[in-house]
Image (spheres, rainbow, N blue to C red):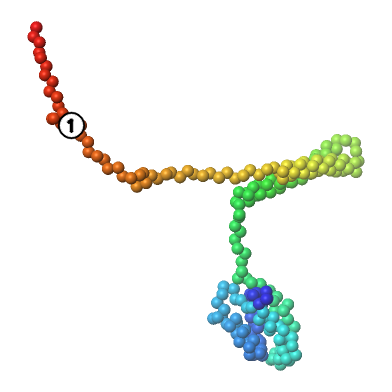
Amino acid sequence: MMAAKLNVSLEPHLQDTLMALLRILPEETCQQLTPHLSPETNTTVVPLIPYELILQISRWCQTTDGKAALRACSPPLDPQSYIMVSLLAGTRTSPEKHFPPYTAKDPEEDQRLRTKDRKAIATLVNAVLSVVGTGVAMWLASEHMVMRLEWRALMAVSTALVVALAEIVLYMIWDSRQASRPRRPARKYVVPRQKEVAESSSGPDMVPQASSTAVGETDLRHRTTTSTTD
């Protein structure tokens, strides 16, 4: 079932090899092969041919009738040129399919992992440089000592091994702390939405009633004052 869904890129050498079979193939197989060898019908960016069709042609070429038909051609065709290994040499399987683009589930988590990887690489490089630098420094410092080359080399290697062991212990401690460190939850900032107060939602419309501050004539009281003359 999987082979029936696979396509193979129709390379120029494969096309030339299959072209020579159009005259001798069975009619049904020839009808299936002809559209794929025609540039007018095979209009894909990369010319394709089904894997199942190539397998069918290869099996027919290995039969008694197929071998006899191949040898009867002018010039004779070699049946070994039509086995699957020879036919699929230099081809690509399903070139029209591509992996989907990677979509990160949590961009912040991916960023933390990349940062952690960079720190781990920097730590390892620092450890290697420390070991090599210590060994070279010990070798150069031992030049001023009256020692043979064997002892100088042994001292430099021993010092480098001690530093390497210390770096390994420090890296294990650092890695264990990184693994046990609790992850901080991502902060989510919620922007408060401003409340839009509509006039219609503020309650029933209040019809203002007309009021007057004028005092009616009937309500006026005339105050009579008597003037006193000295």
Q: Which residue is mark 1?
A: 214
* Residue at image point 66% right, 90% down: 26
Residue 97 seen in the current view: yes
* Numbered label tally: 1
Residue 101's place in the image compared with 51, above or below, is above
Expressed as whole percent of the image width and height from the top left, the position of residue 56 reads 69, 83
* Residue at image point 72% right, 45% down: 179
Q: Tell me which corner region of the image, top left, top right, bottom left or bottom right, holds residue 30.
A: bottom right
Q: Tell me which corner region of the image, top left, top right, bottom left or bottom right, holds residue 63.
A: bottom right
Of all residues, the one furthest to the top in this rendering is 230
Secondary structure of residue under mark 1 = loop
Q: Nearer the viewer, residue 222 or 184?
A: 222
Residue 44's place in the image compared with 33, above or below, is above
Expressed as whole percent of the image width and height from the top left, the position of residue 158 reads 86, 42
Residue 139 seen in the current view: no
Expressed as whole percent of the image width and height from the top left, the position of residue 198 reads 36, 46
Expressed as whole percent of the image width and height from the top left, the position of residue 88 reads 69, 76
- For the C terminus, the quadrant is top left
Indicate left or right for 60 with 224 as reference. Answer: right
* Residue at image point 71% right, 48% down: 121
* Residue at image point 59% right, 73% down: 46
- Please state which amino acid type lies under the numbered disc 1: Ala
Q: Nearer the viewer, residue 175 or 36?
A: 175
Of all residues, the one furthest to the bottom in this rendering is 72
